[in-house]
Image (cartoon, rainbow, N blue to C red):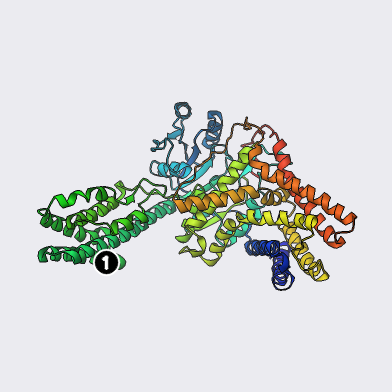
């Protein structure tokens, strides 16, 4: 164990102990219940921050710095470059650089824009070109995830290097990463950093994220939870195909169980209501077949075998009932025609409308109508057609952040991942605030959507460490609500003299200051000279983005809506200028903080404010203003032109 790693562990333990001591004291002894409306939100916000500290310390506890693979590169490779509407020059620059990768491979442009000029340029350069048709919305289904899934069935390399359209690969990228797959046959993913060539030293948009593409990913790697970030990664085709098959089987099994449950309810009710003994016997026989199929599936029998008897029983029942009063069926037609099981939905799998399914279970149907409804449910599932009816979806489509969701599913199946901390591709970051805000909103919405739809804390197959590592990333996007409290509390004190704590006493400082100082020391040691201040600023300054992402993700999951995939523009600055409508909350917060600071100093000057409290909250307000000032810098920022990218082997960092 190195001295730095030992120092990280010592500081992590101290940070957790001191932070827990401070927050417990805050809950037990320092809440000003007379001002509970601000005191309680503040202590909840501090508790959230403490949990965030726990997650960070846990992440860094097993941080892993890999020297590189021990085995030489081996295996066949397809390099897949995803694009939708990026400039053709940019796409071809990346494709030609990919073509020059030293290790033998096939290069493919995956063009979801279906552009003839891109296809022509690719063919002329000897580069593979793949596209796909639009869905009913006029856009390709499932955006980038759907694009990659489509390519998986049209290529055949054992490994896939995935690149965004702007990520220029180093010629040695495969030499530096493929060996990990030979070192460990259970490795499904090797992720490398994303680094941007058009970001200057100031980096006012916070694009480089050196803390994440470094210590944090290395920490997750120690828990076998380093995840796919969408580009600059190599994946094992076998693992993805297994993921697609397992997902398909689970999808069909779950939907079949639900359909058979409703079918049994329908037929049982009609059997009880039947006046004719022969009719009742026929329906009881069908119910028995359905119940037997449910038991067989629960016992692990193949779905197609278990439901074959149900289909046969449905056919027999229908033949015996068809001679009954046809007029009684007419009222059933509308209900039967709209079977509440679909495939053309966001999840790209069998999707069951629970509300309509429950409505069908209680609908007033004739006996033959009930039998035909059962047939309709089975036909909607298309159990007997297999993969022709439902193409496999190896990359997850439950969210616009298909990368994290896919990695989590791979880990749940027992596959391993590697984070290789070496810059092996160079891309283009957003060059204006509007584009950056759109990008961050998409990341946050997609991550929270995964948390709501497939929470890692309860996901089968993940280890305890993996559950916490994934949840820690998702947890961080909930910080927008705590930011509002941290911005409001000092202003409320300075303007109105309302204290969220019982007193600014020695007890407070004796607990808070050690916790704060040790926490900052931990960040300094972890960062090891890296510039992480921008990341700390944006974790607070983007609070409206995080709040909007939470509300949108929750609403979309609740109402079953899909998130739109916004492609980050790669053709320079957005011509619309500063997005004032998007940053008015931050500007308003800065104005309120400034007014609060002035009024607080005035109150101190006229003797109506406590000196210690005013000093503490003045420092707090000044810190908030410094943090939020990054929004002003970002609004004024005019990104530099992209610097030339060195793609020679010596260019690898």
Asked if 535 appears above or below 110 in the picture, the reply is below
- Given residues 253 and 110, the one toward you in this image is 253
Residue position marked by numbered label 1 in the rendering: 296
Q: Secondary structure at mark 1?
A: helix
- Given residues 109 and 500, the one toward you in this image is 500
The single residue placed furthest to the bottom in the displayed view is 28
**Residue 304 seen by the camera:** yes
Asked if 405 appears above or below 53 in the picture, the reply is above
What is the quadrant of the N terminus in the image?
Answer: bottom right
User: Residue placed at 44% from the left, 27% from the top?
Assistant: 116
Q: Quadrant of residue 164?
A: top right
Left or right of 557 on screen, residue 251:
left
Q: Position of residue 52 (x, y in %)?
A: 65, 61
- Given residues 188 and 32, the one toward you in this image is 32
Q: Position of residue 558 (x, y in %)?
A: 47, 53
What is the quadrant of the C terminus in the image?
Answer: top right
Q: Quadrant of residue 642?
A: top right
**Residue 203 seen by the camera:** no
User: Residue placed at 50% from the left, 58% from the top?
Assistant: 416
Q: Position of residue 488 (x, y in %)?
A: 72, 55
User: Residue placed at 70% from the left, 73% from the top?
Assistant: 28
Asked if 292 appears above or below 156 in the picture, the reply is below
Crowd tier of the residue under label 1, counting other residues whose Cα lies within 10 Å: few below 14, some 14–19, many 20 or above: some
Q: Give the number of marks.
A: 1
Q: Position of residue 456 (x, y in %)?
A: 51, 61
């Amino acid at each position: 164990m190195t001295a730095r790693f030992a120092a990280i562990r010592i500081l992590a333990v101290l940070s957790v102990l001191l932070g827990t001591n401070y927050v417990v004291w805050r809950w037990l002894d320092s809440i000003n219940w007379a001002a509970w409306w601000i005191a309680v939100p503040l202590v909840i916000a501090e508790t959230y921050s403490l949990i965030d500290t726990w997650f960070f310390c846990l992440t860094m506890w097993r941080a892993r710095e890999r020297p590189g693979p021990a085995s030489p590169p081996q295996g066949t490779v397809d390099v897949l470059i995803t694009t939708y509407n990026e400039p053709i020059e940019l796409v071809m620059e990346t494709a030609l650089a990919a073509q020059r990768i030293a290790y033998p491979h096939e290069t493919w442009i995956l063009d979801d824009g279906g552009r003839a000029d891109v296809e022509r340029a690719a063919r002329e350069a000897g580069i593979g070109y793949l596209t796909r048709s639009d869905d009913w919305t006029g856009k390709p289904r499932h955006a980038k995830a759907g694009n990659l899934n489509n390519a998986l069935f049209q290529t055949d390399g054992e490994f896939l290097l995935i690149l965004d359209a702007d990520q220029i690969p180093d010629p040695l990228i495969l030499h530096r990463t493929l060996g990990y797959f030979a070192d460990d046959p259970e490795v499904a993913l090797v992720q490398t950093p994303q680094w941007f060539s058009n970001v200057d030293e100031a980096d006012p948009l916070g694009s480089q994220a050196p803390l994440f593409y470094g210590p944090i990913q290395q920490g997750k790697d120690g828990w076998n939870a380093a995840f796919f970030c969408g580009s600059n990664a190599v994946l094992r085709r076998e693992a993805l195909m297994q993921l697609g098959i397992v997902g398909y089987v689970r999808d069909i099994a779950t939907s079949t169980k639900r359909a058979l449950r409703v079918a049994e309810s329908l037929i049982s009710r009609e059997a009880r209501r039947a006046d004719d003994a022969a009719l009742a016997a026929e329906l009881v026989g069908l119910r028995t077949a359905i119940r037997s199929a449910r038991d067989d599936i629960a016992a692990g029998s193949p779905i197609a075998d278990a439901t074959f008897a149900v289909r046969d029983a449905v056919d027999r029942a229908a033949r015996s009932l068809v001679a009954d009063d046809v007029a009684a069926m007419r009222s059933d037609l509308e209900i039967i025609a709209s079977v509440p099981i679909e495939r053309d939905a966001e999840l790209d799998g069998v999707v069951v409308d629970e509300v309509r399914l429950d409505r069908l279970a209680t609908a007033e149907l004739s006996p033959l109508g009930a039998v035909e409804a059962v047939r309709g449910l089975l036909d909607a599932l298309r159990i007997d057609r297999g993969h022709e009816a439902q193409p496999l979806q190896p990359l997850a489509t439950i969210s616009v952040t298909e990368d994290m969701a896919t990695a989590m599913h791979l880990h749940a199946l027992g596959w391993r991942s590697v984070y290789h901390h070496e810059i092996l591709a160079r891309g283009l970051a957003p060059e204006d605030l509007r584009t950056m805000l759109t990008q961050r909103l998409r990341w946050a919405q997609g991550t929270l959507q995964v948390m709501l739809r497939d929470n890692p804390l309860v996901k089968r197959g993940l280890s305890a460490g993996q559950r916490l590592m994934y949840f820690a990333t998702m947890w961080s996007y909930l910080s927008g609500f705590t930011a509002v409290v941290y911005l409001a509390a000092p202003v409320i004190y300075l303007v109105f003299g309302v204290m969220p704590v019982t007193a600014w006493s020695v007890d407070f400082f004796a607990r808070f200051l050690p916790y704060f100082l040790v926490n900052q020391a931990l960040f300094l040691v972890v960062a090891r000279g890296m510039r992480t201040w921008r990341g700390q600023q944006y974790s607070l300054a983007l609070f409206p983005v995080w709040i909007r992402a939470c509300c949108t993700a929750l609403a979309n999951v609740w109402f079953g809506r899909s998130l739109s995939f916004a492609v980050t523009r790669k053709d320079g600055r957005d011509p619309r200028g500063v997005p004032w409508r998007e940053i008015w909350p931050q500007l308003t917060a800065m104005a309120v903080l400034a007014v609060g600071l002035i009024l607080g100093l005035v109150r101190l000057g006229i003797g109506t404010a406590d000196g210690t409290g005013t000093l503490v909250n003045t420092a707090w307000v000044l810190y908030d203003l410094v943090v939020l000032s990054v929004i002003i810098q970002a609004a004024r920022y005019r990104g530099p032109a992209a610097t030339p990218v060195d793609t020679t082997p010596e260019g690898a960092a």
